[in-house]
Amino acid sequence: MAEGYLRNLQIVPTTSIGQCSLMSEALLFFIAAALLLAGFIKGALGMGLPTVSMGLLAVAMPPSRALAIVIVPAIATNIWQTFVGPHLRDIVKRLWPLMAGTVVGIWLNAGSLTGPYAHYVPIALGVLLVIYAIVGLSRFSFNVARRDEKWIGGIVGVVTGVISAATGVQVIPSMPFMQAIGMEKDELVQALGVFFTVATLALAFSLSTAGVLTAATALPGAVAMVCSFTGVLVGQAVRSRMQPEAFRRWFLIAMIFLGLYLVGTAIFNLHPA
């Protein structure tokens, strides 16, 4: 019966309706605000753009669409961070197993953002944000001996890649590992840029293969690019004037509440089904 009356259901104007146009403008404004904040945090702390932007955008859209918008600004800002510092050769020499393992993990779990279990992704993303924030607040740390960092890095990379392919976030467990191998502060900041560049490029390839990166994401992606770079510049400008530890602590607390909100909302939306 539904197929028989399909023509009657399609009698609608082909021009855009005002309400839809306003909704689109509101969504673009939300994307701009989210990427501006995420860029500011990255500029102030040296990390956090994909983590913050994915967490915020997942409130208003599916994580696969959010990642398609975030991926290009993430790659661009990470490339910028990669070449700020003199440690590039040493970083690649030490972290190549981590980066190779991450690429393998993304390949193994490719398609999870758009697969049959995609509606559980916001729950996984929310849980990951909470874990990331709790680990950061607890100051949990461990040391990895130089002789063991390559094989441990490979395992950590595969786990990171599997999680990244499902959530778009690459900080767990790669971040604790990079802190555990004893890098200096400036070297660690550059290492984050190198690692996240490789990880986001691999993720972008996976998304393009799955057909998630389309022309529909071009406009919001351009808005995200401009706002993320603006936020990074502002964050870098105020970095020296703020207390980084206090800022970092409140940032992690906010990530806990955002993660809990994502989990609660996703579970509530799944309940009727």
Image (cartoon, rainbow, N blue to C red):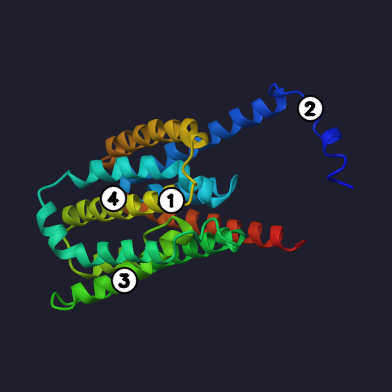
Decide: few, some or many residues near mark 4? Use Cα within 10 Å; few <14, some 14-19, many ≥20: many
Among numbered discs 4 and 3, the one appearing first in the sequence:
3
Q: Earlier in the sequence, mark 2 or mark 4?
A: 2
Q: Earlier in the sequence, mark 3 or mark 1?
A: 3
- The circle on residue 156 is 3
* Image position, residue 97 (x, y; %): 22, 67
Residue type, numbered disc 2: Val
Q: CA distance from mark 2 to mark 3?
A: 52 Å
Query: Callout 3 environment at 10 Å: few (<14), some (14 to 19), or many (20+)?
Result: many
What percent of the width, then of the height, locates residue 184? 16, 59
Q: Nearer the viewer, mark 2 or mark 3?
A: 2
- Calculate the distance from the C-alpha at mark 2 to the C-alpha at mark 1: 34 Å
Distance Cα–Cα, label 1 vs label 4: 18 Å
Q: Amino acid at mark 4?
A: Thr
For disc 4, the marked residue is: 197
Disc 2 target residue:
12
- Cα separation, mark 2 vs mark 4, equals 45 Å
Q: Which secondary structure, mark 3?
A: helix
Question: Relative to residue 265, is residue 230 depicted above or below?
Answer: above
- Callout 4 secondary element: helix
Callout 2 secondary element: loop
Residue at (49, 59) in percent of width and height:
111
Q: Nearer the viewer, mark 1 or mark 4?
A: 1
- Residue 5 is left or right of residue 203, and the answer is right
User: Could you tell me if the residues under marks 1 and 4 are in contact, i.e. CB atoms within 8 Å?
Assistant: no
Mark with earlier residue (1, 4): 4
Residue sitting at 36 percent across and 60 percent down? 171
Looking at this view, is 3 or 151 the one in front?
Answer: 3
Looking at the image, residue 153 lies above or below residue 203: below
Q: Amino acid at mark 3?
A: Val
